[in-house]
């Protein structure tokens, strides 16, 4: 996997929150309070400088904040799992997570993180190979949809239904499979490393996530035992 941009992206996420963490210096008194406040201010300035340095490094690589509203969605049709990302120009992070939803399929990332992801997909050739628009097809194992502003692109991974002895077609399908999952795994890498506290409407509490993970594992195991196209 060629996650060339992900280490830089994760570094931006790590330094995006000042080390003060909203700490309240009120519990301290006298000289201790002054020293604590000074330390926090120095930490904030250092974090801001590190963040700016990281943004400059990303800019040198052609990565900039994506300020158009963006939505990226990966659908694994064999397991029924969906994961997706919005950028903060699409929806406010606090507002989105504070509204109870039936699932935690989507997370909200910073505009710079969305810019890095779209740059990565572009380097993989996603926008060259994708169908323009929101395209729906049957007989596919995975779909990846990107919306950016008023534009949209879709990549599908169809099931292989050709001659099992046709080596040329099998090789072509395998290449498409590798490309599609390379793009999807780039999305999943950011999804998995993005922390989110989403309110979920369910009666199972924390058990909801265990049951959902088990359902996905079983569906993927059945898929691997069949066509071999699933994940």
Image: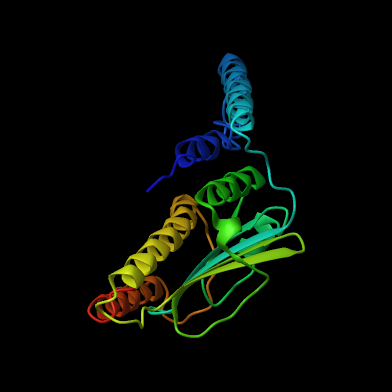
Q: Is residue 218 above or below residue 95?
A: below
Q: Residue at x 59, y 68 (%)?
A: 154
Residue 148 lies, in percent from the top left, at 70, 59
Q: Is residue 32 above or below residue 167?
A: above
Quarter location, residue 65 = top right
Q: Residue at x 58, y 50 (%)?
A: 122
Residue 224 lies, in percent from the top left, at 26, 75
Question: 108 or 224: which is nearer to us?
Answer: 224
Query: How many discs mark residues in the rendered view?
Result: 0
Question: 187 or 11: which is nearer to us?
Answer: 187
Q: On the rendered structure, is 161 left or right of 123?
A: left
Q: Look at the image and name its color scheme.
A: rainbow
Quarter location, residue 102 = bottom right
Q: Residue at x 59, y 14 (%)?
A: 31
Please state, as top left, top right, bottom left or bottom right, where the C terminus lies in the image: bottom left
Q: On the rendered structure, is 9 left or right of 53?
A: left
Q: Residue at x 40, y 75 (%)?
A: 208
Residue 78 lies, in percent from the top left, at 38, 79
Quarter location, residue 23 = top right
| Outermost residue, bottom side | 138
């Amino acid at each position: 996997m060629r996650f060339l941009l992900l280490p830089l992206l994760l570094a931006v996420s790590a330094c995006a929150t000042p080390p003060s963490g909203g700490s309240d210096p009120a519990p301290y008194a006298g000289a201790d309070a002054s020293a604590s406040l000074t330390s926090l201010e120095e930490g904030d300035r250092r974090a801001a400088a590190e963040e700016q340095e990281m943004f400059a490094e990303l800019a040198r690589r052609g990565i900039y904040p994506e300020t158009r509203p963006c939505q990226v969605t990966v659908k694994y049709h064999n397991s029924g799992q969906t994961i997706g990302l919005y950028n903060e120009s699409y929806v406010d992070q606090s507002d989105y997570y504070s509204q109870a939803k039936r699932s935690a399929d989507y997370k909200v990332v910073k505009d710079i993180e969305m810019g890095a992801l779209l740059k990565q997909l572009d380097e993989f050739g996603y926008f060259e190979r994708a169908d323009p628009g929101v395209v729906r097809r049957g007989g596919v194992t995975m779909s990846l949809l990107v919306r950016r502003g008023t534009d949209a692109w879709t990549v599908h991974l169809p099931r292989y239904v050709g001659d099992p002895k046709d080596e040329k077609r099998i090789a072509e399908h395998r290449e498409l499979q590798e490309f599609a999952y390379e793009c999807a795994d780039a999305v999943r890498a950011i999804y998995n490393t993005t922390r989110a506290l989403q309110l979920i409407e369910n009666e199972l509490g924390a058990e909801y996530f265990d049951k959902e993970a088990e359902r996905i594992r079983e569906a993927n195991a059945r898929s691997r035992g069949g066509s071999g196209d699933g994940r």
